[in-house]
Image (cartoon, rainbow, N blue to C red):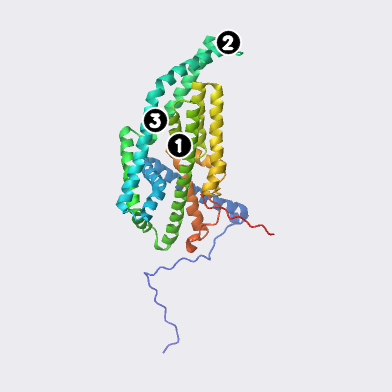
């Protein structure tokens, strides 16, 4: 019997991973400082991430007629979810809870639209006449006031203003048309959003279970926990914004009615809708109320209307909201403004509307995964862009 070892049979179908211990370096590689190598490594990874984000945004804009109804349906579901869950806890049949929720939401929207149309039809002629008088008085002030402008100069400035407004209106309509499309697209999107709302209320859990199965098996628990925390955050965001919008609309609408400002109900509805765009929406809609008071009622009523707008926003932001919602941990308002501005630049008004809830969802989901909170089931302990969890008060040592 020979002592020589027989050659070991090598399976040609078995995969042998290449060795990672061999590195090939050159004089040029050794001359490059380590800080530059680290910077380059970070740079190309950031470029890959930016390319993926850009591709995702391009796909969203390409499929905007599908994405916008989907986002609208999800946001409306988050708004109606607390009332829907309350009916389920009260042992309502699911079909009855869905019917009551959807019909109630449609009824509220229809009632608001009817009130707006009714008051606009009733007060629009008077507002137009008062606007003409206000323009005439302002023109007389420019002629006889300290500026001493000539009629030709005033006409030139007016024409420049009309041209500027026309350009901005054209850009706005073009952007709105690019996002919403034709009237048929709007109707189709509305019906699709309604169908998505009903589907999520009827079988949202089943839809999500099917979605989770698209991910690798090992990552499913993390994905599920991250998405559930993100969804809870979106619901908190929608509930808070609904509260904020209601307070702003009632306060500013009642103030406008008491001051004799026309179109008080349309102004209140506009404020309610605008408040769903954090910070920016409240400022813009409040400015519309003040401008309407200035044109129709004069400078003193406009100043009083400005005081009402500021008082309502301060009352809501610093007194009522902390009492009813707790000490909300939020990101700095500058970051919210930047997120809203970025969303508006990418997708116009829908982008501004969905920017903050989308950023909040992504932030909470990422923090849930990065901190390992999905393993323990606890709430993620990190800085969140939006959270309504009260801060724990520190006890003073006596």
Residue at the image point whose x is 51% and y is 65% from the top: 20
Looking at the picture, tell me which residue is in the foreground, 262 or 186: 262
Q: Is residue 277 above or below residue 398?
A: above
Sequence-first disc among 3 and 2: 3
Element assignment for label 1: helix
Q: CA distance from mark 2 to mark 1?
A: 41 Å
Residue at the image point whose x is 50% and y is 17% from the top: 134
Residue 125, image quadrant? top left
Mark nearer the viewer, 3 or 2: 3
Residue 208, image quadrant? bottom left
Q: Is residue 256 above or below residue 313?
A: above
Report which residue position mark 1 lands on.
272
Q: Please indicate whether residue 20 sits to the left or right of residue 94 in the image.
A: right
Report which residue position mark 2 lands on.
144
Sequence-first disc among 2 and 1: 2
x then y, percent, for residue 53? 46, 46
Element assignment for label 3: helix
Residue 116's disc is: 3
x then y, percent, for residue 75? 41, 45
> Is residue 375 visible to the viewer in this orientation of the structure?
yes
Contact between marks 3 and 2 (CB within 8 A): the answer is no
Residue 250's disc is: none
Element assignment for label 2: helix
> Which class describes the residues within 10 Å of circle 2: few (<14), some (14-19), or many (20+)?
few
Q: Please indicate whether residue 366 sits to the left or right of residue 125 in the image.
A: right
Sequence-first disc among 3 and 1: 3
């Amino acid at each position: 019997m020979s002592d020589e070892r027989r050659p070991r049979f090598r399976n040609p179908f078995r995969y042998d991973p290449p060795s990672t211990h061999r590195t090939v370096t050159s004089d040029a590689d050794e001359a490059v400082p380590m800080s530059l190598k680290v910077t380059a490594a970070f740079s190309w990874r950031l470029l890959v991430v930016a390319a993926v984000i850009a591709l995702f945004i391009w796909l969203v804009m390409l499929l905007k007629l599908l994405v916008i109804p989907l986002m609208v349906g999800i946001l409306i579901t988050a708004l109606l979810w607390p009332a829907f869950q309350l009916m389920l806890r009260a042992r309502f049949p699911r079909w009855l809870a869905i019917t009551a929720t959807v019909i109630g939401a449609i009824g509220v929207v229809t009632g608001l639209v009817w009130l707006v149309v009714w008051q606009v039809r009733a007060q629009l002629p008077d507002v137009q006449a008062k606007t003409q008088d206000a323009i005439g008085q302002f023109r007389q002030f420019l002629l006889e006031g300290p500026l001493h402008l000539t009629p030709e100069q005033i006409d030139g400035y007016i024409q420049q203003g009309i041209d500027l407004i026309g350009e901005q209106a054209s850009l706005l309509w073009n952007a709105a048309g690019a996002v919403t499309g034709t009237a048929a697209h709007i109707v189709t999107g509305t019906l699709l959003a309604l169908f998505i709302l009903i589907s999520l209320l009827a079988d949202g859990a089943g839809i999500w279970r099917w979605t989770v199965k698209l991910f690798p098996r090992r990552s499913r628990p993390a994905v599920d926990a991250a998405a559930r925390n993100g969804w809870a955050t979106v619901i908190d965001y929608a509930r808070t914004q609904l509260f904020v919008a209601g307070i702003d609309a009632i306060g500013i609408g009642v103030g406008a009615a008491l001051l004799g400002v026309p179109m008080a109900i349309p102004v209140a509805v506009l404020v309610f809708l605008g408040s769903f765009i954090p910070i920016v929406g409240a400022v813009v809609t409040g400015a519309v109320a003040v401008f309407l008071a200035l044109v129709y009622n004069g400078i003193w009523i406009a100043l009083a209307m400005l005081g009402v707008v500021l008082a309502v926003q301060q009352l809501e932001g610093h007194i009522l909201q902390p009492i009813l919602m707790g000490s909300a941990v939020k990101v700095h308002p500058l970051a919210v403004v930047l997120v809203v501005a970025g969303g508006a630049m990418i997708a116009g008004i829908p982008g501004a509307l969905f920017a903050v809830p989308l950023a909040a969802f992504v932030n909470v989901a990422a923090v849930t995964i990065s901190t390992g909170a999905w393993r323990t089931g606890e709430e993620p302990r990190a800085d969140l862009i939006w959270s309504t969890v009260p801060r724990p008060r520190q006890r003073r040592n006596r």
